[in-house]
Image: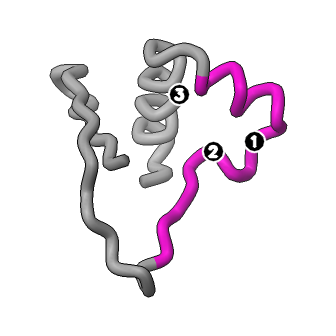
Amino acid sequence: MGFAWCHHCRIYSGAMVHVPRRRVLVDALASLPREQRESLARSEARLIDFLDRRFEDGAQ
């Protein structure tokens, strides 16, 4: 799954995408405690807000 969003207009989309086998993907949620990851996974609105905060803080 690919997920893209626009921080400024708050429009997002998800799609199936091809990723080469050797490409390493960064998990923006990997460093979070399990409970917080699960909470974000249950709510698209919370996930978008979290990603927006990371963007505003300079973590891209």
Q: Label for residue 32? A: 1
Which mark sits nearer the N-terminus, 3 or 2? 2
Rate crowding at label 1 as few (under 14), some (14 to 19) or many (20 or more) other CA atoms within 10 Å: few
How many badges with numbers are in the image? 3
SS at mark 1 in the image: loop
Q: Position of residue 53 (x, y in %)?
A: 49, 30
Which mark sits nearer the N-terminus, 1 or 3? 1
Q: Position of residue 8 (x, y in %)?
A: 20, 26
Point 33% across, 70% down: residue = 19
Q: CA distance from mark 1 to mark 2?
A: 6 Å
33 and 55: which one is in front?
Answer: 33
Asked if residue 38 lies in the magenta stretch, the reply is: yes
SS at mark 3 in the image: helix
Q: Label for residue 50? A: 3
Q: Position of residue 43 (x, y in %)?
A: 54, 14
Q: Is residue 47 left or right of residue 37?
A: left
Q: Position of residue 5 (x, y in %)?
A: 26, 34
50 and 15: which one is in front?
Answer: 15
Rate crowding at label 2 as few (under 14), some (14 to 19) or many (20 or more) other CA atoms within 10 Å: some
What's under tag 2, amino acid-wise? Leu
Q: Quadrant of residue 15?
A: top left
What's under tag 3, amino acid-wise? Phe
Point 44% across, 86% down: residue = 22
Circles 1 and 2, Cβ within 8 Å, touching? The answer is: yes
Q: Label for residue 29? A: 2
Span of residues in magenta? 24-41
Point 45% across, 18% down: residue = 44
What's under tag 1, amino acid-wise? Leu
Name above or below for residue 22 compared with residue 26: below
